[in-house]
Amino acid sequence: MASLALGACSGGITPAVTPAGAASAAALRPNLSTFYGCPAFKGHPYNDVITNARVDKHSADYIDSMIQAGNTAGFYASTGNEQINLADKKTPLLTVQPKVKYHQFPVPYPWISNFFIEPTSDHHALVVQTHSCRVYESYSTTYGSGGLSAYCGANWQLRSHFKPMPAGTPSAMASGLSLFGGMVRWEDYQSGAIAHALDWTAIAHTVAEYQFVAPASDTDRLAFYGSSSYQLPYGARLRLKASFNTSGWGPQATMVANAMKSYGVYLADTGSSSNGLYFSNDQYGNNSWSGSDLSVLSQIKLGDFDVIKLPKVQSVH
């Protein structure tokens, strides 16, 4: 799959937003995930364990609506395209020139000329500033003689809870969620467990066009092609059923499935033909993931999930 996100940062329309709802009360214990000495968001919401969280009363309706709209594919590990750049105190700070006036970058990003930019169409860039434990993310990123520019993006402090973007605002993802926060990092695998929720990229036109729930803040604004009134909002959290059998699976796919059971997946964006999960290379740019191991994720279908009780649904037009 060349690109997971089809409509990331698709804003530019003045949003009309309904009042924010209360966040899900699913926190059971803190996450132990760290990245080069930094917590990978300390606390809620990416790090909530949701094994005992309540299932939404319309869970089956949301799942059925996506399937009816055409989402019958399994999950897919998108490997080899993403890498997290490391910055330190000596890394220069560059002003990010916005490509559109309605997405601004209020703070400079740490950047040097050899930092990695995703080579496929989304052109994501991720930088973790290790001394401050701050993450910087951007979409449609370019760097050259004209400096650093991007279409949209966001930055967060990793030592605190994930702070949602203002309603109607994307991040480097259409939903406003953190690409770093929900990415399967090679360092997760090395630690022995993926101790955080994952970002999930659904097949385009099978989820809500305008609806989202916290901790998301925006949508792809792509039309829903189904007929059901139950359109899954961006930011919805799904949990792989505990009964799903991974016997005989390799260690990498098993670890991903276990994370789906314990932490779940957030609807973060939309893509083309599969239900995508983001994976990062190691710090040296090596793609050490095993395609044969991870290929069994295609056996996981939407019918294998429950939708966790949704916060108040908000709408952006």
Image (spheres, rainbow, N blue to C red):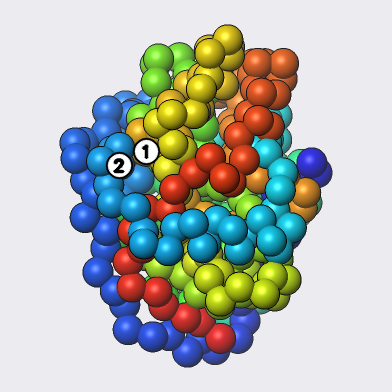
Q: Secondary structure at mark 2?
A: loop
Q: Amino acid at mark 2?
A: Ile
Mark positioned earlier in the residue sequence (2 or 1): 2
Residue beneath disc 1? 263
- The number of callouts visible is 2
The reply, left or right, for residue 232 in relation to residue 97 is left
- Residue 152's x, y, as percent? 59, 65
Query: Residue at 57% across / 21% down in the picture?
Result: 253
- Residue 137's x, y, as percent? 52, 51
Query: Residue at 21% across / 36% down in the picture?
Result: 30
Please rate how many residues cluster around mark 1, counting C-alpha atoms within 10 Å: few if below 14, some from 14 to 19, many from 20.
many
Query: Residue at 30% across / 42% down in the picture?
Result: 50
Q: Amino acid at mark 1?
A: Tyr
The reply, left or right, for residue 60 in relation to residue 82 is left
Q: Nearer the viewer, residue 59 or 215?
A: 59
Quadrant occupied by the N terminus: top right
Instruction: Name the outermost residue toward the left.
Output: 29
Q: Alpha carbon of mark 2 to alpha carbon of mark 1: how far? A: 5 Å
Please rate how many residues cluster around mark 2, counting C-alpha atoms within 10 Å: few if below 14, some from 14 to 19, many from 20.
many
Residue 310 is labelled as none
User: Looking at the image, is 273 positioned above or below residue 293?
Assistant: below
User: Looking at the image, is 190 positioned above or below residue 11?
Assistant: above
Residue beneath disc 2? 50
Query: Residue at 70% across / 63% down in the picture?
Result: 69
- Residue 20's x, y, as percent? 31, 77
Q: Is residue 309 visible?
A: yes
Whether pointer 2 and pointer 1 mark residues with C-beta atoms closer than 8 Å, the reply is yes
- Residue 19's x, y, as percent? 32, 84
Q: Is residue 105 visible?
A: no
Quadrant occupied by the C terminus: bottom right
User: Looking at the image, is 252 positioned above or below residue 98?
Assistant: above
Q: Secondary structure at mark 1?
A: loop
